[in-house]
Amino acid sequence: MKGFRTAVAVAALAFGWLAGCNDYNNSIQYNTGATLTNLSPSGLPAGSPAFVLTVNASAGNGFVGPTNGKGGSSIRWNGQTLPSPTFVDITTMYVSVPASLLAKPGTAYINVYSPQSGTGNNGLSNTLAFQIYGTPNPVPTITSVAPDSAPACGSSCTASLTITVDGTNFLPASNNGGTLVTFQDKLTPQQQPTTLTISSFSDSEIKAVVPGAFLANPDTAVIQVVNPPNGLCTQPSCLPLVGGGPSNTVSFPITGGTQTAIAEETPAISQDGRYVVYASQQNQINQILLKDTCVGVSSGCSASVRVVSAAADGTSGNADSHNAVVTPDGRYVAFSSAATNLVEGAPAGRQVYLRDTCIGAENSCRPSTSLISTDTNGALNGTEGILPSISSSGRFVAFVAVTASAAAKTPAAAIANAPSAPNSGMRQVFVRDTCLGASTCTPKTTRISMMPGDAPANGSKPAGPAISGTAKQIAIVDEKSATMFAPTVTVDDTVFLAIPKAQ
């Protein structure tokens, strides 16, 4: 019995202590002030200037306005009362928030205190979160994917494929999850974009693994990279999300059966083997790409791919490009393209272009594209340019000009007697002097030979000229070829070596 009386005394003492330490004379306190519904804005980037914060409450349990000279409800920021709030009505108040409270990313907690109206009423509202965002994440871009296609491997395919995605603004995993690589085709779950496993990562290159199960059937997959929004604002309560988002999409053909025509084109290679130029399908358009393999470089080089069939601003060609050739140092690439956006005012149809990649050039060099199949005298009017060949320095480019639509209208004898006249219906070989590297020079285009029809007389594939490294000799296929230069040296029954009189 004595022990029981002792226990009761201790309990009573504890209850009295709790009551004495409570500002509201109640041992258990609940927030009994206004019910907050939302903030406007609900967040801002770190470093923002001072702003006006609007706080809204439920009409059934709202704010208290100032009366009889007494203060009404006040707005608190992380427990600190913000001065001079404005009471609009029981559901709306606003207050100025100084810029100093937005200096660093984080979360601020907003509540409202209303004057105590009786015992057990602490006057505190519920709390809402205000997000202070960090620097918005950038939107990524994809410049190339290698390989850019894969063969269909059948239903029993188990081998995975590692792809290299080059681009910009890739984020590490520590930044709210980092950049993701997605792959979508008819075999991905629900045919939706599926995140690939990343095997290596940098800010400009990601290697990702495509499961063999996604490559079983012929299809055209879509590859994309996605950056997350800023790490301090990922919940619906702090929408809109800040920064990040998906990149451009890149098509990834999964081929089956016979190989496509683009795979039959012969690649070109620099003298040291480091640079390889080849045709590849990007977004359903054949582009010319240049691969830096880093062969022969011991350090400081990362393998990369760039689009060569591009305008000065880097925009890829809007139609197919073919037949690339490259100078020994890898800097200049000539190719034929039907694209109309590579240079301003490009002629219709296939034309020959020269791309300065700036490889090995001074830092002031900017990649550029120029039209090669052009002639101020009009000899190339209405023609298409194909099958280029380039000299070692890149200054001279030989190519074939074709006007196939009128092949039967102009007898060859008439053209032979008037070589300066327009040459409808002919395959003509021209050489363009671009004046690259020459201090005093005017670009010009010179016709080397003419031949009727749109293909060699023996019915084989059309063949272009071959220009020597020094541009002093040009080899031409077709036993009926004539040349405006002399002498002409027979190599065999169908190949002639045209040697200009002077350069």
Image (cartoon, rainbow, N blue to C red):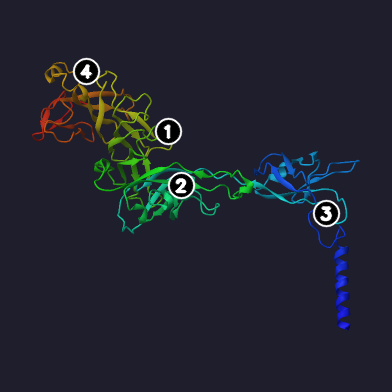
Disc 1 marks a residue whose amino acid type is Asp
75 relative position to 338: left or right? right
Badge 2 vs badge 3, beta-carbon distance below 8 Å: no
Disc 3 marks a residue whose amino acid type is Asn
C-alpha distance separating marks 1 and 3: 65 Å
Residue farthest to the bottom, as pictured: 1
Q: Earlier in the sequence, mark 1 or mark 4?
A: 1
Please tell me in which quadrant of the rendered image residue 386 appears.
Answer: top left
Query: Is 2 in front, or is 333?
Result: 2
Q: Earlier in the sequence, mark 2 or mark 1?
A: 2
Picture coordinates of residue 267 (x, y %)? 26, 42
The residue identified by callout 4 is 422
Q: Crowdedness of circle 1 by 10 Å Cα count: few (<14), some, many (20+)?
A: few
The residue identified by callout 3 is 122
Q: Secondary structure at mark 1?
A: loop
The residue identified by callout 1 is 313
C-alpha distance separating marks 4 and 2: 52 Å
C-alpha distance separating marks 2 and 1: 22 Å
The residue identified by callout 2 is 225
> Residue at 49% of width from left, 50% of height from top?
179
> Residue at 21% of width from left, 35% of height from top?
468
Task: Tell me if residue 439 can be seen.
Answer: yes
Disc 2 marks a residue whose amino acid type is Val
Q: Earlier in the sequence, mark 1 or mark 3?
A: 3
